[in-house]
Image (spheres, rainbow, N blue to C red):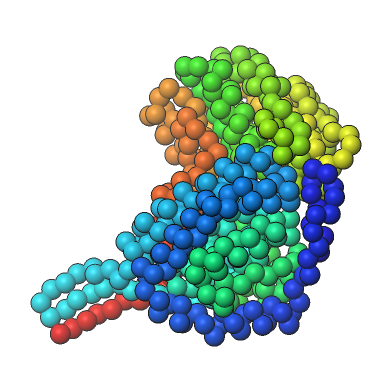
Amino acid sequence: MKIINPATEEVISTLVEDSFESVQKKFKLLEASQKQWHKVLLSDRISIIQKFSQLLEINIEKLAATLTAEVGKPLQQSRNEVNGAKARIKWLTENANKYLADEVMSEEPGMTEKISYEPLGIVCNISAWNYPYLVGVNVFVPALLAGNAVLYKPSEYSTLTGLEIENLLKEAGVPENIFQVAVGAKEVGELLLDFPFHGYFFTGSYKTGKYIYERVSKKMVPCQLELGGKDPLYVADDIADVKTVAAGTADGAFYNNGQSCCAVERIYVHEKVYDQYVQEFVKEVKSWKMGSPTESGVYIGPLSRKDQLSFLETQITDATQKGGKVEVGGIRVKGKGFYFEPTVITSVNNQMNMMREESFGPIIGIMKVKDDAEAIQLMADTEYGLTAAVYSSSQVRAEKILREINSGTGYWNCCDRVSAALPWSGRQHSGIGATLSHAGLRAFTKPKAYHLRG
């Protein structure tokens, strides 16, 4: 399997993909050792994961360089991701005992009732390339804390990072036979679906997630899916500072080249502030530096996957044929690397593919609306349900709008952010289940009820 640098199109590494026999060997190692890992004191498992976080800090420059080389995100954004992973680990380790230890529910003379949170067993984690540290930490950290063994398959576009993660986990003290990495692309992922895992946790597209869910359903084990989104954002007419809102929401749409599950994917703006907002938004986009992701000050690097270039071109062609106006960008950059100009399109509508299908790239449509009611109608017009955002000077107004939107997360005067203290979950085609928060810790457990008389 060739690892290609998306900025230069050069092969930076060649790896041997796993086979059925090698995956089977790794699974048997996990199977033979998971119960012993569960017997390790929770406090000791917490200490090991905390050491892993310390190693992320010590090795951050090396890790960021590897991530940038294989995924293409600007170096500072790679550093930001590693630091973000550390922040999530901090919350998860500080709260693991609270949510994973036995919980006494009632205690009366002669009868105690408690819940014990037992590990699922052997967890299969099929992960994503766009944020391999953040997406991975959401799964393998709470899984290990809860006493599970983990078979981790990084995306074929971020495998070097996945192997770095494995090395640091084992350096921190996770036993060799408790965390194993499967190397490979689609075919290796397909192999994993045939093994008797006790839980599947996938991050990726709706199409692949639906396929996995259907394939493993007969096993009757937990299958959580963190899928894509077509996340809407509404700018109300009462915002105090149009320029600041335009800059902040542009970042929400284009950070990591728009390759974020919770990136802003479509924007609706009240007609009273529409013209000024579009002007400031386009001005902000034009100010960004595009270039080599290792160069200082670069905000827009290459896309991670070459095939996304033609997909974006198809969306733009569809939009312009249906009346959309390209305000800036709209074309791939000639030369080496998978570069695409950040693109803003106005005069859009919800019949355009770019307003319905996940773009996962540096492209955004901005649409004028006459009032909150129209904004709600358009925001809700989607098969996805990951996040939704409202910018307004009134929290009451914003929350009233957000309650009408069927999404796992609602933002007021912010967007494109995740907190370890809050559940990360999608609705409809955006997935099923939750990671992070107390829900994400307990997602990797089976509750057992104890009725203790005596």
Q: In x, y percent, where is residue 300?
A: 71, 34
One can see residue 354 in this view: no
Residue with the most extreme left position = 109
Any part of residue 9 in sight: yes
Quadrant hosting residue 349: top right
Q: Nearer the viewer, residue 438 or 98?
A: 98
Q: Residue at x 61, y 72 (%)?
A: 180
Residue pictured at 46% horizontal, 32% vertical? 412
| Residue at image point 50% right, 60% down | 52
Name the quarter where the N terminus is drawn: bottom right
In the image, taking residue 312 as reference, residue 68 lies left or right, namely left
Question: Dividing the image into 4 quarters, which one contains the C terminus?
Answer: bottom left
Q: Position of residue 177 (x, y in %)?
A: 56, 78
Which of 254/384 is in front?
A: 254
Please state the total of marks drawn on the protein image: 0
Q: Nearer the viewer, residue 249 or 231?
A: 249
Which residue does the image show at 33% across and 74% down from the upper left?
A: 116
| Placement of 377 over or under 246, stated as above or below | below
Q: Position of residue 362 (x, y in %)?
A: 71, 35
Quarter-of-image position of residue 398: top left
* Left-right relation of 267 to 48: right
Left or right of 112 in this view: 128? right
Pick out the residue farthest to the front: 58
Rendered location of residue 28, percent (x, y): 61, 84
Relative to 282, is 337 above or below?
Answer: below
